Amino acid sequence: MARSLSLGEFEQVVLLAILRLGDNAYGVTIRSEIAACTGRDAAPGALYTTLDRMEEKGIVRSWLGDATPQRGGRAKRYFSLTKPGRAALINAQRAYQTLLDGLDLVGGVRA
Amino acid sequence: MHNVAIAEWIVARFTSKKRAAAIVGDLLELAPEEGRVWFWLSLAGVILSLAWRRLLAFAAALCAYFAAFGGSFLMAYLHHRFTIPDQPWRTVWALLFVASNCLWCLLAYAAIRYGVRDRFTQLLLALSPPVAVGLYCWERPTIVVVCIALSIYVVLASALRSERRRELPIIFVVLMVNAAIFLLTAGLIALYQRFLLPAPVGNAGIQPRVAVQSVEFCMLFLVTPFAMVSAYSRMHDRLMRDPSLDSQTQG
């Protein structure tokens, strides 16, 4: 991908949740993982539009699983990071880390 | 759950059928814990999130279409000497005028729906101003020549670059759709006028008839832009999408 991908804050949260969930990352689990880790109740509309946008940009890819009766016979749409997506996330996190260096903000005396 | 099927159908208007089914499936999975009210509120939120940009873009496209038509009346009002050329150039001018309005309408839609980084938006941004300036300044040969040269340069630059070749067929097809809808609308308006007023009454006879004028207005200013942006968004989604992304979505 020629153009470097920039990620918003919510996009990074969603990507980290997908990474934590591994093979079981779909709408419901991503939302509950975000809630468990950040205490943030992500609106379903915001989550799905973010996932769609990231798929259009080539940051994540999706595939359909099996249909289950619990879901009215509708398949789950699983997500995983693409290589450019993983690289963009690493870059974004590295930038945060660089900015945090020397600040003692997380767990430091001035936290 | 008949209502859920309807909800899924509505969501599918704004995204693909598979995505819509997965979204509704996710919400159904959580519905036993969260409740029916949560399900429907979340669904409304999802539809709003998926649709707002498209609706706003369509509203902007309508405004641009109005403004482009209104611009000519404003020019005529502010600039009493502003006239359109005589035949045989009058037909060419009229066709370019309709095409220019179409470009402004698409530019407003594309800028909001896909953003200014989108290649098609950038092409429209480069093409719309010289076409419009050339039309309104048709009496000044120097300006017309510069505008024609600029437009030709933009078209050629787009045609010669392999990554930008997809935009020109989209513009061509959308302009054809616009022309076809415009002609169809004119034909339907003529039929409608003949149905309401069988005897030939002329423009003076039609002007007081608000019903005839309202239908004409709605057909011209609502149906034409709607058909245009629908054709454009479908072609954009098909042609401008990176094909490598399609292979990543399995199932």
Image (cartoon, rainbow, N blue to C red):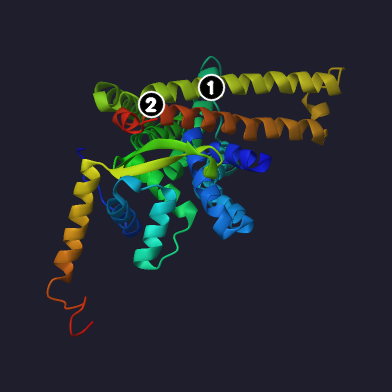
Image quadrant holding the N terminus of chain A, namely: top left
Residue under label 1, please give it.
Answer: B177
Q: In the rendered structure, find residue B133 and report the number of the disc placed on it.
A: none
Compared to residue B5, the image places residue A40 above or below, namely below
Residue drawn at the location 17% of the way across and 65% of the way down: A97
The amino acid on which the numbered mark 1 sits, given as a three-letter code, is Val
Q: In x, y percent, where is residue B46?
A: 52, 50
Label 2 – label 1 distance at C-alpha: 17 Å
Q: Nearer the viewer, mark 2 or mark 1?
A: 2
Q: Label 1, secondary structure: give it.
A: helix
Residue drawn at the location 22% of the way across and 43% of the way down: A84
Determine crowd level at label 1: few under 14, some 14-19, many 20+ residues with C-alpha closer than 10 A.
some
- Mark 2 vs mark 1: which is more N-terminal? 1
Residue under label 2, please give it.
Answer: B239
In the rendered view, does A13 fall on the left or right side of B31? left
In the rendered view, does B47 fall on the left or right side of B115? right
Image-quadrant location for residue B219: top right
| Chain letter for the residue marked with disc 1 in the picture | B
Q: Label 2, secondary structure: give it.
A: helix
Residue drawn at the location 55% of the way across and 18% of the way down: B91
Compared to residue A16, the image places residue B227 above or below, namely above
The amino acid on which the numbered mark 2 sits, given as a three-letter code, is Leu
Q: In x, y percent, where is residue B153?
A: 29, 26
Q: Residue furthest front?
A: A69
Image-quadrant location for residue B126: top left
